[in-house]
Amino acid sequence: MALLSPSRRVRRTPFSDGVEAAGVKAYTVYNRMLLPTVFESVEADYHHMKKHVQVWDVACERQVELRGPDAAKLMQMLTPRDLRGMLPGRCFYVPIVDETGGMLNDPVAVKLAEDRWWISIADSDLMLWVKGIAQGFRLDVLVDEPDVSPLAVQGPKADDLMARVFGEAVRDVKFFRFGMFQFEGRDLVVARSGYSKQGGFEIYVEGSDIGMPLWNALFAAGEDLEVRAGCPNLIERIEGGLLSYGNDMTDDNTPHECGLGRFCDTQTAIGCIGRDALLRVSKEGPTQQIRAIAIEGDAVPRCDRVWPLFAKGERIGQITSAAWSPDHKTNVAIGMVRMTHWDSGTALEVETPEGMRMATVQPGFWA
Ligand code: THG
């Protein structure tokens, strides 16, 4: 593919200088911001992440901040997940739905205080929807995008690296919770979370000016841990069943179709804008759903459009993400499959740009 023309519309991040010095080989654009996709190679990056520790520039996971007396009310209007039991210091993975129950985003909600939330968004212009609702319902809440840029530290040695920079107490942070930790005299949110199944942390870097100092401190502290610059890895995230908004699902899909029913409490999520629509569709249950799918044969090419899925010549779904897995010695994939063909073991055919391949519905994701 040709190169990406840089311009003001494609925002750099507080870590871009470090990413470039580390030899980034490819970028994508996410929330109108640069997101690295390859350093050495997708496969080499994958093996390194599973064995060591990586620092990821995920500043493109922008924060939509809700601040004010109606912040919690607004947050509950956005999602069918019941937030009443959520305490400050917690992070929740939350489907965000429109009035039809269609997925608008699948962010991580960070509850800083009853009246202060961050919505750590996937790739869609969620702030416009949130501002529209706040204004339309005359809510007493400010909605904006603060100067906060997540930096992820992922891999089996993440705890050791983080302890060297933030102190031993960081090891005690539990999954999907956060604590406040100091760096150069500034208090930062540090959560145990991240877009991989290898474990690790996300540092919500508040203030672009400390971006490179923190980046450099992590690399200086982790030399003997073989720390490297990395990024969300296509192979690893498919193995783990981590969904990519805009790729694996769009606003045409309900959370239940996406397999996110476990993050919905539609009965009790009073105030959620999509609640009535979801109650209607969830009565019958979804008629298609996301599945782990293995594709036979050699490494598939990059999946940059839907690949139709067939059974006996009939179209029954589509593949939306696929990659060769060196650890599982098969092509791992994420697809949306009709109910009639979604059972584990069902044999399918997938139309790739390089021809038809046999494929099989898996009992679950690989990791
Ligand atoms: N971290 C933060 N912001 C993000 C992402 C992130 N914004 C964009 C994107 N990623 C949002 N999508 C996801 C998808 C999956 C998860 C988090 C964000 C995730 N899921 C876990 C799982 O499915 O195993 C755990 C969910 C749970 O049990 O609560 O982590 O990565 N800040």
Image (cartoon, rainbow, N blue to C red):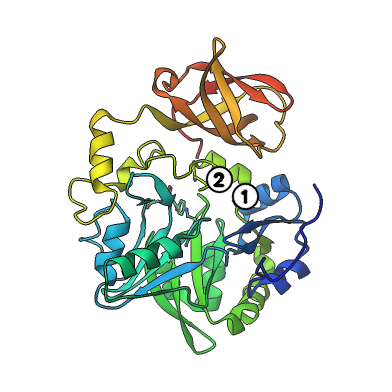
Three-letter code, disc 2: Arg
User: Does the rendering let one see residue 265?
Assistant: no
Question: Residue 58 falls in which quadrant of the image?
Answer: bottom right
- Left or right of 115? Residue 333 is right
Residue that sits furthest to the bottom in the current view: 185
Crowdedness near tag 1: few (<14), some (14–19) or many (≥20) residues, C-alpha within 10 Å: some
- Looking at this rendering, what residue extends furthest in the right direction? 2
Q: How many marks?
A: 2
Which residue shows up at 60% across the image and 84% down it? Answer: 209
Displayed quadrant of residue 300 = top right
- Residue 197 in view, yes or no: yes
Q: Which mark is residue 233?
A: 1
Taking the spot 28% from the left edge, 51% from the top edge, the residue there is: 80
Q: Secondary structure at mark 2?
A: helix
Residue at disc 1, CB closer than 8 Å to ligand 1: no
**Distance between the Cα atoms at labels 1 and 2?**
6 Å
Whether the residue under disc 2 has CB within 8 Å of ligand 1: no
Q: Residue at x 29, y 71 (%)?
A: 71
Above or below 334: residue 177: below
Towards the viewer: 130 or 26? 130
Q: x, y percentage for residue 224?
A: 68, 67
Query: Residue 235: percent from the left, percent from the top?
Result: 62, 42
